[in-house]
Every structure is written in C-alpha cells, then in structure tokens.
Amino acid sequence: MSGFILRRLGAALLVVWGVLSLSFIFLQMAPGDPSSMYTRPGTDQKTVEHIRQQMGLDLPVWQQYLVWSREFCTGNFGTSFMQQRPVSEIFAEAIPNTLRLTVVVFVLQLVIGILLGVLTAIKRDSSLDFILSSVLLFLYSMPGFWLGLMAIMVFSLTLGWLPSSQMQSLVIPDGTLPILWDRIRHLILPASVLAAPLAAHVARFVRASLIEVLAQNYIRTARAYGISRWKILFKYALKNALLPLTALFGVYLPFLLAGAVITEYVFAWPGFGMVTVNAIFAHDFPVILASNFVAAIAVVAGNLISDLLSRAVDPRIRLEPGS
C-alpha cells in the first residue's frame, strides 16, 4: 500500500507540474496584456514599459517561466496584478468560504441522492419512478449557470423568499441566531443549485446499484425465509448497494470545485470560484496559475482517495502487485 501511494504521489507531482506549465504557456499565448489595466490609450510608452517591468512582463517568456518556477517551488504564488496582494492571502480568505458551501453541498447530495435512489428503486417501473427519474435526468443535464439564474428569477425576484447573492446581508442583524439565519438564507440557493445535479447523479447510481443487488440470489433466499421487506432492504440490500458509491467520494471533489466556480460567480459568493473568474477576466496571471494549481491538486487527490476507498470497501481490489 505504501509503495502504491508513493508512486501515485510521484506521478501526481509530474501531472500537477505539467498542468501548471501548460497553463503558463497558454496564458502567454492568450490575447490581451495584463498591464493594460493600469494604462489608458494615451499613456506614454515609457510609463507602459515601467509598469510592465514592475509586473515582470518585460522579460522573455523563458525567463518569466524560470522566475515563476523558482518562486512557485518555494511556496510563493506571487502577487495579484489586480488586487496588489499576495495570492496566498487572497486564497486564505476565499477558500474557507468555498469550503462552507461545498461541505453543505456534499452532505445534501448524499442524503437527497440516496433517499431518491432508494425510492425510485423500490418503486421501479411505477409512475412515481418515471416522474422522479425524468426530473433527475433533467437536473443532471442542465447547466449549472442556467439552474442558478432560474433559481434567482423564481425564488428571489418573483417570490422574494431568498437573497440572490453574497454570503451575508449588507446590514448584518444583531444577535447570534439572526446572524446564523441570515447566513443560512444566503446559503440555500447556491447550495441547492450546486447540489441538484450531483444529487441526481447519486440517485441514478444508487437506483441502478440497488436494483442489481435486489436481483441477487441471497436476496431471494432472504425473502424465502420470510424476512420482512424493509429489513431485507435496509439491512442487506442497501448496505451492499452503497459500497460502490464510497469509491466515488473522491471523484466528487473536483466536480464540487468545478461546479463551485460557476455557482459562486452566479450568486456572487466570495469564494475560490469568484476569485478565479474575476482573475480570468482581468488577465491576473498569478491568481489564474494558483487556481489551476488548486484544481489540479483536487483532481489528483480525488482520484487517489477513490482508489484507496475502493481498496478499503473491497479488499479483493489490488492496488499494487502483492498487496
């Protein structure tokens, strides 16, 4: 097991560095000049050159790459062109806000997805199964930004039930409970929109897995012995049907991060996604590269977690020769 983990970590370092190097190259090839945010059409050439020199853009591309590589390897992600603050400081403020959102989404997608998956499996081929499966397919297929805009239009603009943006109100209420309720109200829409397609995927996965388990011979034997339907479902069938789902926990990590980028921008949630999108629009190279680094780490870590969970729930899976 330890040998497998070390090999995967070594490969992960190469993958992450490859992603970052390609990102650096593509950013250099992209149209636009980051220094343009500090200049106007009438700005004299000496001022423009001075600004580019301060930003490190006057060097040849290969020298920029070497300087960036050296700083990045020491943990220095650079200074944001747009905010003139260290990128690590920006992420330290934004990532906890994203974690608040994604943790809630992760719990929602599992609870709602498993419940709907069980319900559609035991009501297989019924009208309820057809309706729920159609709704789940619709939610799974719809783009996240469209769901977010529709949710804002219905629940914020039309009904006025929930706030449409930000993590808290501009005027913060007094008292612990009012503040907590204000945070929850702002969390409901983005969490629901981000959790909807993921919960639909979990529900469809659980439905298919549970139907397959219920057709096994040991389930038929349990029925023949007169064991109650609900005991068979929750004690024997569901436990085995959910085992493959544990292997997907790590895969959901990059999906959550990718979905959060769009959802946070739609709802102006001050998290990692919002920072990333704003950096792309502003050609803020240091923030974009650091964002790609976080995304690459999430993908690599998610795949490693999936492999380890697969081995944990099913010891028959071999991660390495002789394991």
Image (tube, helix red, strand yellow):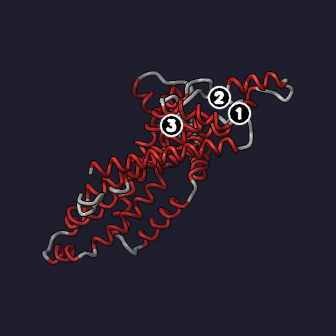
| Above or below, comparing residue 267 to residue 321 in the picture | above
Q: Which residue is mark 3?
A: 186
Q: Residue at 26% of width from left, 51% of height from top?
A: 1
Question: Residues under labels 3 and 2: Cα distance?
Answer: 30 Å
Can residue 45 be seen in this snapshot? yes
User: Looking at numbered disc 2 in the image, what kind of residue is underneath it?
Assistant: Phe
Callout in the foreground (3, 2) = 2
Q: Secondary structure at mark 1?
A: helix
What percent of the width, then of the height, locates residue 64? 63, 34
Q: Is mark 1 in CB contact (under 8 Å) with mark 2?
A: yes
Q: Nearer the viewer, residue 298 or 170?
A: 298
Q: Secondary structure at mark 2?
A: loop
| Above or below, comparing residue 74 to residue 197 in the picture | above
Question: Residues under labels 3 and 1: Cα distance?
Answer: 34 Å
User: Looking at numbered disc 1 in the image, what kind of residue is underneath it?
Assistant: Pro
Q: Quadrant of residue 165?
A: top right
Q: Residue at 59% of width from left, 31% of height from top?
A: 67
Q: Which mark is residue 34?
A: 1
